[in-house]
Image (spheres, helix red, strand yellow):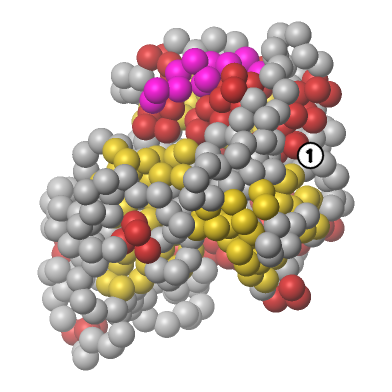
Amino acid sequence: MVHIEITKGLDIPIKGAPIGTPKPLIPVGETSFFTPPQLALDLSGFSDLKLRLLVKPGDSVNIGDPLAEDKASPGRFFVSPAGGIINDILRGPKRVPMRIVIDVAKDHEGYRQFPLLNPSKASREEIIDLFKSAGIFTCIRQRPFNVLADPSKIPRSIFVKAIESAPFVPSAEMQAEGFEKEFQLGLDTLAALTSGAVHLVYRKDTPFKAFLTAKNVKTHTAEGPHPIANSSLHIEQIDRIHSVDDILWTLTARDVVAIGYLLTTGRCFHQRVISIAGPALLPETTGYFKVRDGFPIYPMIAGRLPKGPVRLISGDPLMGSKVTAQDFLGFSHTTVCAVPENTEREFMHFFRLGTEKYSFSRAYLSGHFDNQDRQYNFTTSLHGEPRPFIDSTLYDEVMPLDVPTMLLVKAVMAEDYDLAVNLGLLEVDSEDFALPTFVCPSKMEMTDIIKNGLQAYAKEMS
């Protein structure tokens, strides 16, 4: 067992944290459980893939039916989160499919039934084929580069993160609660797919028995501020990447539950616990809720927002995507948050004391207060414009990975990938640079820089 403990990092003191325990979503003003008229398969996070659409508007589908196929990995399907009729297919630049909207059947949703497999008796090929056809391989990521895992390659090890630390994100315990047997079965199945070990990382003080008594895995504990839940940190501490040939897979606790559920029932798992949170929400309307994959945004925020401009985000505030009330929950997102939209620039803000504004660099007076319990009403304002790098020391205070943050970002910007690899490019993902981006006085979008750099270098190596 490895115990991972960090002091570098930051739990952002943002108002509007969710409270309570997970419960079915009932929109404000309603009295009964809400069944959405539409659900959607969000493909916007896979714009780097070449997808083959398998359906068209008007087609009838069941839960688990294939809607799109990855051309680079034939048989890897993105499956339907609902049973009903295909309503619309939204495309982006170059007609890349971004979203498939489904009108949910009002009477009865059909399920696609998959074969039941016993992981102790099934061959690796049978398990891989089942995972590809049931959409499991759209959730398994591969390091380096954090791309979708290549089913034809045997990973050296598999990392399951049963810990979350990003703002507002529901805990891993919430995702696995009630599915303890499925979680263990998922771990047993993953153990049959690697030549090494399955590493399970969970928070040190977790009371969740399914994590503490997990079998067929190597368990590790972690404690510290965000980004303690990032897989890059776990990999660096347990099984470090040294070259492009070091193939590792990463999953979340919910992904493992989905595997066990598939093998137990022969059906796709389409439930998730989400949080609705953020400083723009009305008091006492935040919380944790049980919803379907591809849930519409509107019923989640209806009755929870005040008048005035608000930015809606699918995903956590650091790594989420801007959405509207007419959009749907992102493919892997477990948070919907609302932040006040800053529409006017504050006059002479740089001359003000800033006692009500958060400042990591202590530019405002609030940065000198020693009040760890204080929370701030963050907005979308950047408080400045992009400028050249001016201070590299701030990044190292929130970056627990053993990489020189500013030098690595500069190497990627210069497309000097040989230097970037020497500085640790193969060991990182874009999410590892969310906090450096947050504290950056130069307003550099480091997450986008690293993401684009990893994609470019991955194509170069292929």
Query: Image height check: is 216 above or below 436?
Result: above
How many numbered callouts? 1
Residue 383: image location, x then y, percent: 33, 78
**What residue lies at 81% left-to-right and 16% top-to-bottom?**
123
Residue 127: image location, x then y, percent: 75, 24
Whether residue 321 is visible to the viewer of this picture, yes or no, is: yes
Which residue does the numbered mark 1 point to in the structure image? 150
Whether residue 4 is visible to the viewer of this picture, yes or no, is: no
Task: Give the quadrant of residue 121.
Answer: top right
**What residue lies at 52% left-to-right and 21% top-to-bottom?**
183
Query: Image height check: is 218 above or below 132?
Result: above
Q: Nearer the viewer, residue 436 or 136?
A: 136
Q: Nearer the viewer, residue 27 or 331?
A: 27
Q: Nearer the viewer, residue 113 or 419?
A: 113
Residue 435: image location, x then y, percent: 42, 56
**What residue lies at 62% left-to-right and 67% top-to-bottom?**
88
Q: Residue furthest front?
A: 107
Residue 277: image location, x then y, percent: 29, 54
Q: Residues within 10 Å of mark 1 (few under 14, many from 20)?
A: some
Amino acid on which the number 1 mark rests in the picture: Asp
Task: Give the quadrant of residue 151.
Answer: top right
Query: Image height check: is 297 above or below 240?
Result: below
Task: Give the quadrant of residue 303.
Answer: bottom left
Q: Is residue 209 magenta?
A: no
What segment carries the magenta color? 177-189
Q: Secondary structure at mark 1?
A: loop
Q: Residue furthest bottom?
A: 347
- The overriding secondary structure of the stretch rendered in magenta is helix
Position of 134 with respect to 75 (left or right) is: left
**What residue lies at 27% left-to-right and 72% top-to-bottom?**
340
Position of 200 with respect to 414 (left or right) is: left
